[in-house]
Amino acid sequence: MGDHCGNIYELRPVSIIRTLPQIKDHRLFQLKLEDGTTWESFGHQPGQFLEVSIFGKGEAPISISSPPTRPDILEICVRRTGRVTDALFEMEKGSTFHIRGPYGRGFPVETLKGKKLLLIAGGLGLAPLRSLLLYVLDRRDEFDDLILMYGTNNPDNVLFKYELLGFYDREDINYLYSVDRDDEGIWKQYVGVVTGLFDRAALSPEDTYAVMCGPPIMYRFVLQKLLNLGFSGNHIFMSLERMMKCGVGKCGHCAMGDRYCCIDGPVFPYTELENIKEAI
Ligand SMILES: Cc1cc2nc3c(=O)[nH]c(=O)nc-3n(C[C@H](O)[C@H](O)[C@H](O)COP(=O)(O)OP(=O)(O)OC[C@H]3O[C@@H](n4cnc5c(N)ncnc54)[C@H](O)[C@@H]3O)c2cc1C
Ligand code: FES
């Protein structure tokens, strides 16, 4: 967890600098701390989440989508689904609300340093994975080869479209993307599920770390593919999503076997999950 000054429940007021529509019912919110400090004082790591707390509405766990290497603005990418996210979508530039966090175990950045990385995202899974992706791009010389595979269900649902387009001009990232369906025939890249992209990448499982984030159905197939290719379980990391309430290991809502997703995760090495039946 970050620097809570000893109080893990501490609420911090934030305000909205900008909201950027992404795809239908998904928006990127750019936030600043109301106390005037930069996000360095929050102390988040790639892959951690925060609780959005809106008075009279409730709280919702939301992944931090921006890396600590960019401390001026914190970004969250939100899908409108219910009470808290509805309230957030009603807010405008300058509106304020509270957050608490950062919470959970993020991506193992120190372990990944110097290694070849394969990042695999599906749908809204790109939101948490982006914090790691941008961290790696900001500190590119600290990591070896970087492959990003991103799959969505159709061409209208690509998140961070313009940012991703920019990756084509970079030689230090191999970006592959797929859509499950392309009913209008407009997609120039691969059509099919994200695992189809594995045939298009030169992978060396013995010295590559795979990190994935996406819908549960994606995990089963991607995991199978990685294990078949020879990736070892401790080279595979996945970010999980569970129903959460407290976010700090007190209420038990997010239990999976003997683990709590909120404090033991949301990022887990596969080796910690293979014996927890309900995890994947
Ligand atoms: C660690 C973590 C990170 C998350 N990151 C993001 C993010 O970056 N962006 C984002 O948009 N959402 C994210 N979520 C999901 C988000 O927290 C839920 O959608 C939340 O319920 C929204 O709150 P609400 O009050 O708007 O909706 P609610 O009024 O709670 O209703 C939302 C509906 O979704 C269901 N639901 C609630 N939680 C979950 C869940 N975890 N999985 C599936 N269904 C659920 C509820 O049963 C209900 O039907 C994350 C969840 C977790 C646990
Ligand atoms: S959300 Fe309460 S224990 Fe995890």
Image (tube, rainbow, N blue to C red):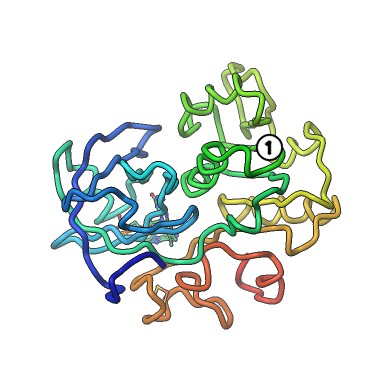
Asked if one can make out residue 176 in the rendered structure from this viewpoint, the answer is: no
Viewer-nearest residue: 93 or 13 = 13
Residue at x 37% of width, y 81% of height: 251
Residue at x 41% of width, y 78% of height: 249
Q: Is mark 1 within 8 Å of ligand 1?
A: no
Image position, residue 89 (x, y; %): 24, 43
Image position, residue 166 (x, y; %): 53, 22
Asked if one can make out residue 75 in the rendered structure from this viewpoint, the answer is: yes
Viewer-nearest residue: 147 or 56 = 147
Ligand 1 occupies quarter? bottom left
Quadrant where the N terminus is found in the figure: bottom left
Residue at x 85% of width, y 54% of height: 228
Is residue 91 toward the left or the right of residue 254 in the image?
left
What amino acid does circle 1 point to? Ile
Decide: few, some or many residues near mark 1? Use Cα within 10 Å; few <14, some 14-19, many ≥20: many
Image position, residue 63 (x, y; %): 42, 53
Q: Is residue 85 above or below residue 103?
A: above
Is residue 154 toward the left or the right of residue 277 in the image?
left
Among all residues in the image, which is located at the extreme front? 141
Residue at x 20% of width, y 58% of height: 98
Q: Is residue 139 above or below residue 112?
A: above
Image position, residue 26 (x, y; %): 37, 39
| Residue receiving disc 1 | 147
Q: Is residue 153 above or below residue 11?
A: above
Toward which corner of the image does residue 145 lie, by quadrant?
Answer: top right
